[in-house]
Image: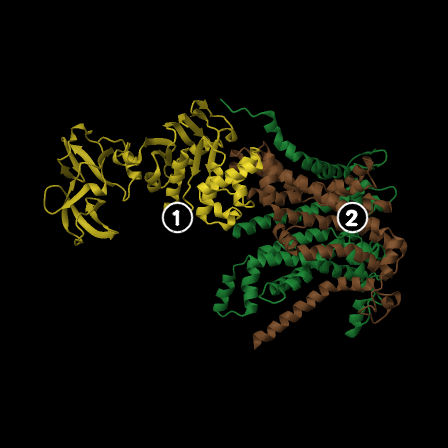
Amino acid sequence: MKKRRNLKETLSPYLYLAPFLIGVIVFTLYPMINVFIMSFKENYKYLTGAFSGFGLDNYTTVLSDPYFQQAIINTFKYVLTVIPISTCLAIVLATLLNQNIKFKALLQTAYFLPMVTSVTAVGLAWKFMFNYNSGLINFFLNLFGFESINWLQSAGNNFLALVIYGIWSLLPFTIILLLSGLQNIDPLYNTAARIDGASPLRIFFKITIPLLAPTIFLVLIVNTISAFKVFNELFPLFNGPGVAYNLFTVVYYIYYQFRGLTPPKYGYAAAAAMILFVIIFCFTMLQLWLQKRASREG
Amino acid sequence: MKSKFSRTGIYLFLFMGAALMVLPFYWMISGAFKTSAEITQFPPVWLPAGFNLDNFKFALETAPFATYFINSVIVTICCIVCCGFTTILAAFAFSRLQFPGRDLLFSLLLALMMIPFEMLIITNYRTIVAWDIHDTIIALIIPFTSSIFYTYILRNFFASIPDSLYQAARIDGCSNWKYLWKIMVPMAKPSLVTITLLNAIACWNSFLWPMLATNSPAVRTLPFGLYAFVTEGGAKTERMMAAAAIVVIPMILLFLFARKYIVNGVARGGLKG
Amino acid sequence: MKIKIENLTKQFANHTAVSSFNAEIESGQLIALLGPSGCGKSTMLNMLSGILTPTDGSIFFDDEDVTFTAPEKRGVGLVFQNYALYPHMSVLDNICFPLEIQKVPKAERTRRAIEMAKLVHVESMLERKPAQLSGGQQQRVAIARALVKKPRLLLLDEPLSNLDARLRIEMREEIRRIQQETKITTIFVTHDQEEAMSISDAILLMKDGVLQQMDQPQRLYDDPANCFVADFLGNPTINKLNAEVKDGILYVEGQPMKEINAAKLPQQRKLIFSCRAESIRLQKAADGLRAMLIQTYVIGKEMIAALQIGGSQIRAYMDSDKALPAGLEVTLQFRDKGIFIFDEASGERYL
């Protein structure tokens, strides 16, 4: 004899899931599959839906497009400068903020504030500060005896401006994660090392950093993924991809293919999106692997 | 003696860093009150001579910032309410209800979490065009009514509530629906507040999607409205700062009031929205 | 309410938690479901409450078959081991909750909740949250919440295990008092034999999903059905010595024991000679089992001797309160009560 489950009982889990799943299917799963298929459609015409066949045409075109190559180089350059600098800075700042200091709440508020604010709006403030003639940053440079720099309108310097802004906006999130990692370290290790007579600097390098390693890896990966998607910052600072497209990034390239061109090149955009996905997928896998390893050790 | 010296050094370093973090906000807000003479002066003016509201007036008069603001509020509220609702229901199903394929479905969703939204915009843009909701407020809300990430966070919290509470309620004749809203949701309040705040911040600041999905000023939200104001109006810097301040100030206030929830949420989630 | 359990079996994926359980419980009794951890007693309780559905067999409440009745329709109150109080609700709201679900009008449910709170003595802390209560107070609230809907059967899962030793004794007497005042048939699960012995009307002793014996506590102690029952009850634990019957005579640890009639005992089988510590009398140089004194010690007012016989150690209460020197040779004599002989392999009782 088995207890009979009535229809209502069997269906109810799916009813709970339905609103959520519909959203996920329509706006995540379907687009994902669609982009995948679209990236292989050759000579795809958006208006008619016609295409000449499946192949790697879009990929070869995109990969040999100098703008895309530029975008890939720029994106990697951006990731490789912003991530190491912001992580090192954040480790130092988080360690100091984790000390037994006064004004902790005030300082944390200051350091975390940029996290909640619009990239566009604060980007405009930075644009103002980067101004060649009346900007605050050139004022400071002059104060210390350096020449003014044309941050925004010179192709040689605007990448640097993007990097500075990128580091500034990444810091809060990074500091928060590292701080919570630091707070999970048992203070007993610190006490034990101090009793053994280790200097603070020694404790930092020999105890804190190794114990913080899993969090540092996590931060590196999460930030790398988000840095690969650099895009929004370009608008307030440069009104687009810099001087003569010198700051094309991968996401900007995708956006440009179907919003900046007439007629839009959906196939190219899809292929570029797939390439971005593969890059991000690899990093996410790395992240999951590291998280698993970290949780096994911790 | 040495420790006193290094302590002063630490404070000096931390406060200088903090000043640099806050500087753009100060510069934006002080700039919003400057006259056009003050703003172009070099060396720069640190404090505007007076509280001059002309720039705000100008921004509000030339561009429909009031409309943008209202749109932003509507979109943000709708997003957090809809997303909150679907998230609560789905997290409950994944944590408490039994159905075939539950764990498989859940891992599939986790796999979908790694897809960047930027990759989906092409199709999503075409979907809203096909549905004929392009350039409407609805287009700004609908794609964000479910979030795998928040569902994942909330499910983990729900799963940590002991089974015995559920059984106790069931013995009292409490239905699943009632148990969810009377027991689980009140217990998950801190998590829900965090999720809602993170979601609100993300909605308020969202730029790429509104830029794609809207054309007309009547449906713009603040960040894109601000950008349009800057590019179309060829606005002067002090007016730009006033407009930017309108966008930023609500989130600064939100942060000052709910810092703990936001910071905890980020620290716990370990992921960006 | 009377309960009848017939042939109840619960099979999980890879083990049988309860197998062919049969029992009848009289109305208004306080019953202990006793056994070591993992013996299936919690599974039993969950089947009675309806949280788990049995694989086979039936449960009757009076004459009604409730085997597949949903938990909320059985009219049972359940107190969880961790109390499962809703942390965001006050004590009063917690007690009211079952009535709220039943859509009892607000005024009445408050009245009934306060009545229950008075019964369990928590009426002074109605506005507090569970986190502001001590373990014992949480336990009282949990009992009140289980009782407020006037259940036919009250179930308590390890009700005392989360309390410290002192509170445990206080609360077990409280449970007894509340049960006697309400006269509700009550079943509580425990792994603590002392707890079960001290307050229950009857004990159901389980091992590996099988009911070993059901009886009044003292009967279980005096007349155990098998070696497991004898071993599980009593403190200090019952003494066990190796025994064997040869040529019609019982040998315990190799020494003949002529007092016991070995005629009914099986020949050539490994046996266990069991005796309670209070059934042994220590004597100097008389007839009986020879043993060597290892140590004597005092626990409270009692003096206990540890003795070596052959390869085994036993404990015995001493009549005198004089400590004796270690290494002393003594002989043992046994009272009639508290002596059993079991089969070593099966645990079956022969005497």
Task: Please tell me which residue lies in front, B12 or A222.
Answer: B12
The residue labelled by disc 2 is B72
In the rendered structure, the residue with mark 1 lies on which chain? C
Using the rendered image of the protein, determine whether residue A155 is visible from the camera's viewpoint. yes
* Visual hue assigned to chain A: green
**For residue A266, above or below residue A120:** above
Is B233 displayed left or right of C265 in the figure? right
Tell me which corner region of the image, top left, top right, bottom left or bottom right, holds residue C56: top left
Using the rendered image of the protein, determine whether residue A63 is visible from the camera's viewpoint. no
**For residue C69, above or below residue A115:** above
Assess disc 1: are there few (<14), some (14-19) or many (≥20) residues with their C-alpha within 10 Å of its C-alpha.
Answer: some
Task: Please tell me which residue lies in front, C10 or C278.
Answer: C278
In the rendered structure, the residue with mark 2 lies on which chain? B
Q: Position of residue C141 (x, y in %)?
A: 48, 43
**Separation of disc 2 and disc 1 at Cα?**
58 Å
In the image, which disc is placed on residue A214?
none
Tell me which corner region of the image, top left, top right, bottom left or bottom right, holds residue B249: bottom right
- Chain that is coloured brown in the picture: B
Is A51 displayed left or right of B114 in the figure? right
The residue labelled by disc 1 is C167
* Visual hue assigned to chain C: yellow
Is B138 displayed left or right of C21 in the figure? right
The answer to whether marks 2 and 1 sit on the same chain is: no
Task: Please tell me which residue lies in front, A25 or C192.
Answer: C192
Q: Secondary structure at mark 1?
A: helix
